[in-house]
Amino acid sequence: MTGVRPARLLLALFFGVLALGSGVALMATSAWLISRAAQHPPVLTLMVAIVAVRAFGIGRGVFRYAERLTGHDVTFRVLADLRARVYERLERVGPLRGGDLLGRLVADVDAVQDLYLRVLLPGAAAAVVGGASVGLAWALLPAAGAVLLAALLVAGLLAPWLSAVAARRAESRGAELRGELTAHVVDTLRGAPELIAYGAAPERLAEAARLDRAHTRTAARSSASAGAGAALATLAGGLAVWGALAVGVPAVRSGRLDGVLLAVVVLLPLAAFEVVAGLPLAARTLGGVRRSADRVRAVLDRPDAVREPVSPEPLPAPPYALRVRDLRARWTPGGPYALDGVSLDLAPGRRCAVVGPSGSGKTTLTAVLLRLLDPAGGEVSLNDVDLREIAGDDVRRAVGVCGQDAHLFDTTIGENVRLARPDATEEEVRDALRRARLLDWVSALPAGLDTYVGEHGARVSGGQRQRVALARTLLADFPILLLDEPAEHLDVATADALTADLLAVTEGRTTLLVTHRLAGLAAVDEILVLSGGRVADRGTHAGLLSRPGPYRDMWEREREHDDALTAGRIAP
Amino acid sequence: MKPLDPRLLRYARTTRVYLALSVALGAATAGLVIAQATLLADLIARAFLGGASLAALRTPLLLLLGVVAGRALVAWLQEVAAHRSSAAVKSQLRGRLLAQAVRLGPAWLSGERGGELATVATRGVDALDGYFSRYLPQLVLAVIVPLAVGVRILSGDWVSALIIVLTLPLIPVFAILVGLSTRAKMDRQWRTLSMLAGHFLDVVSGLPTLKVFGRAKAQARTVREVTDRYRRATMATLRVAFLSALVLELLATLSVALVAVSIGLRLVNGEIGLRTALLVLILAPEAYLPLRQVGAQYHASVEGLTAAERIFEVVETPAPAGGTVTDVPDLTRATIRLDGVTVGYDGRDAPALADLSLTVHPGETVALVGPSGAGKSTLLAVLLGFVRPDAGRVLVDWTDLAAFDPDAWRARIAWVPQRPYLFAGTVADNIRLGRPDATDDEVRRAASDANALEFVEALPDGFATRLGDGGAGLSAGQRQRVALARAFLRDAPLLLLDEPTSNLDAESEAAVAEAIRRAAAGRTVVLVAHRPALAALADRTVRIEPAGVAA
């Protein structure tokens, strides 16, 4: 999935092999040294072995350090690459809709880095050093090599596989109960006030305890199989030593093996088994990484939201007229139409509004006009050029949006506004803020334009957030401006003030205001009432109010609601 | 963070059993390791120097087979014990946390705390698995095995034992020293790291915005650059952080090498025998192994330990002592008097409720009005006994509210909060919250009174329809009406309603207001009203101002 840099990966692997290999070599050389020493040779004949033992003793620690550094380094490089690729892909597949998809995607991308650090590198190093150990044993006594190979395969492959299977089985068996328990715990904590007020807490806690006991019992039942992997690995290690003795002792007697090497043959497995000790963990990690990788791949494999033209038409010259004819659009192929036969004319300087309840297709319309979504039928054209013939980035130089989901980046107010035009002067940024009626507030801040807004703009209020976004849109100076529920999530007074300001600053500019609130719409030239993706009615504010219909119903409900609020505020 | 928090033993008793088991299994491991080394040394020495045959070595070989089987058995038992105890301990901690959270009450749980505790009680506690299955047994082994192995080596060759005794303690000492000297550096880099780590999520979340401003393509390079910067910053930290591991490994392996060379040289001079030399060679690495692994497993346990620590903090938070009087006066006849009640919330300049005096007569319906933030909901919380007045008192027929047993007092109250919470379960279960034994007919009647009958019956399974967490599947207005039905079914003499119609349209509001009027007959009602339709129900309207009182 990633553009791996083989040289760096190999370097990390190289150090890993040296670290593990030093451990095995330390034991083998020491065993030989002691056996040889038992024959009381001149000390000089042992010098090479003595130096080697010390070198391996130091090497192990040093190589391990080098391995961990290079391993982490290469992992982060992989991560940088993966993130950039995921980002580039996301840029094309369009917005991910719903829930915490993005948060999980980012966590999944981060999890995939474990593949290299905790699965591939330890696995490959274990394979190389394990293989070398088998090779050494084989060279000394083929039967001992065979014993070691069999034992390493059991401990290095079978045991990790067993423990991964056991973990998966326990997880699937306990998943439902665990889910139920988790939901119950969360529910209890969130609903604690009602539970306490209604005296229902003891019963609720008893139920939690019952669920918890059932969950604990399931976990206990799966414990026997969970231990099997570890037990098998230990058993294989012990049997390898035992088997080496069983084949080594007769070989020494028959002269097939030099007695000095018996200790090497027997003790080699003891050290070689440290090589596979980390593999069960790697196997379990692999399971998690796989699931993450699958989810990341599912996102990357989504089709492009928009088909870019092969040889795009150049962006026509302003002034711009946007024309929509019988537009149909949907978010997934074969899914329901979010827009079904909508027509609209945005001549230069004209201001229109689209109203309707949530789910009526308003946001889909802005997505199509911004060329973030291809029409499924009908036509959208800019100065008589089909929108599909113009490159998306060019369309978005002519059409801009200020929407409910305008994102504030975790940086300063100034940087957030300047995003629209990185070369804007500070005076221009200030002017945009002034037009968005935010300059006084910004100037009063101790750090002014350099004030940090926090993650998702969490350090400023909802109204200020929308106004920063508005200033950014004003600075970009789009010829056609879409305002997509700019006052959503704000309280009524703040929302109406913002809407009034918006309509004031867009005076004389081609504008499409998308909203479900009707206050202030007397100022626009035409209003489209959307319902279920279709145009239910259209006209001016006064015209629509003059006859019975969905618009007048909406208007009356809104008035009633506002009156109630106002009355409540100044109640007797 | 302590390697073994004594509070874990106190609050999760299974930990003690597990610890004892781990010690027993650790001792068994140490014994088996020593037995295996002794047998191996003996077998190799006899076969190499004595040229013994398999038949001659039969007994020690069989013994060795037994030891091998024994080690596998101990490994299995250790895993089983870890699994079972970990599950039991998690269950005990979770239970304690929940019980204590309920004891501490809604005022303590308010704000972010409820959500935070939910995370601690689920994901946080689950992270204890790493601690129990890997870290704790290693810790026990790290104490027992080096000691036992050291003694065994000492009985064979005191020089090697001396080398081990001198180097072994250096490992924790150096690990701590390196840790201390790098902590300042790590702390300094932490801020940079967390900032860089959040960047990707920030950019991905803002992708639609970037696209609108034509900045999306340019950001791909930035993503790469920032992650690269993140890598460089992290590597700078890791270079230092891994030093402690380096010291540990170096000391451990270098000591083994020293031991090997020393016994080799003395073997040449005939100062020790081959059997002893082999024994020492096999045992020396075993002395260092558990210590090396403890270091490696430590990180696996940090998250779980952090969660456990948070749970201990909560469990050790003193819960307010409730009163003991269970003989609550009949509220259909008792007068409730608030006398100079002041409630200050932590961290706010102005008190939530300042010097409020108010008398509520039996059977009266009182509407509370006033700007938001004036303390209307706080007043209800005081009446519920969720919040203790910091000054002043609440008297029920001249008995201080604080003297009553809270559960006995609340049994006389039905309450509908501003944002009622519905539990995962059926609609009927939710309505029955305060009266689990109510009949189906009573539930229906309560729902009908709350103007909820029509929409409940339109649900796929009617009253048996299961709701998601927090009442998912119902609109805010529907949730409110289910909560009202819950309060009506409770049939309590004191009814506390906090904006019970805030999410309803005019028609439903009128119906609910009518139901409240009926329910108010023979009951005392205190309701927070934002709307005229509700205020009209009241015998008396009390205006609450942020600064003080009116009555």
Image: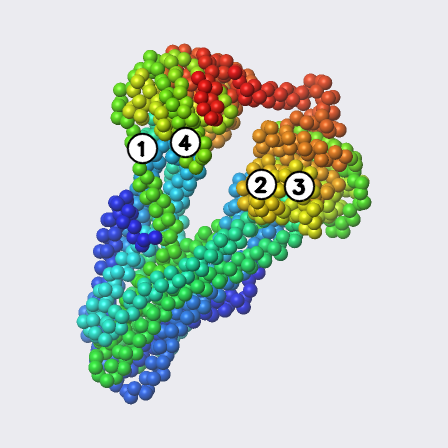
Q: Nearer the viewer, mark 3 or mark 4?
A: 4
The numbered disc on residue A433 is 3
When the figure is inspected, residue A504 is found, relative to residue A112, above or below; the finding is above
- Residues at marks 4 and 1, CA–CA distance in whole angstroms: 16 Å
Residue type (three-letter) at the residue carrying disc 4: Gly
* 4 or 1: tag closer to the N-terminus: 1
The local crowd at label 2, few if under 14, some if 14 to 19, many if 20 or more residues have their Cα within 10 Å, is few
In percent of the image, x 31 and y 54: which residue is there? B3
Determine whether label 4 and label 1 are within 8 Å by CB: no
Where is mark 1, residue-wise? Answer: B320
Q: Tell me: B246 left or right of B451.
A: left
- Percent x, y of residue A232: 32, 59
Please, what is the three-letter code of the amino acid marked with disc 3? Answer: Leu
Residue identified by numbered label 4: B344
* Chain-order first, disc 2 or disc 3: 2
Residue shown at the point (34%, 41%) measured from the top left: B314
Mark 2 or 4: the one toward you: 4
